[in-house]
Image (cartoon, rainbow, N blue to C red):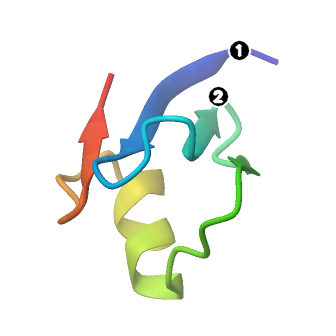
Amino acid sequence: METMVTYSSKANPFDLVQIKSDDSFVIIGDHEPTDEQLQAMVDWMDVDGYDAE
């Protein structure tokens, strides 16, 4: 399964959320994004506190 976009936390660039091609996601690190942030990431939107790559 391919990673479509990766969001990195501005507070700690080692905290990541990877959005996969089937709209699933993987949270890497110690951060806990909110449900609203995760939904915005799955929708490929800008999320406050994260950079998209």
In percent of width and height, residue 6 lies at 48, 30
For residue 5, what is the image quadrant? top left
Q: Residue furthest bottom?
A: 35
Q: Secondary structure at mark 2?
A: loop
Disc 1 on helix, strand or loop? loop
Q: Position of residue 27 (x, y in %)?
A: 71, 53
Crowdedness near tag 2: few (<14), some (14–19) or many (≥20) residues, C-alpha within 10 Å: few
- Residue 31 vs 5, above or below: the answer is below
Label 1: few (<14), some (14–19) or many (≥20) C-alpha neighbours in 10 Å = few
Q: Which residue is mark 2?
A: 21
Compare residues 36 and 17 and report the one nearer the observer. Answer: 17
Q: Are marks 1 and 2 in contact (CB under 8 Å)?
A: yes
Location of residue 19 (image quadrant)? top right
Determine the residue positioned at 82% across, 18% down: 1
Residue 21 locus on image (x, y percent): 64, 28
Q: Which residue is mark 1?
A: 2
**Label 1 amino acid?**
Glu
Q: Position of residue 29 (x, y in %)?
A: 71, 51
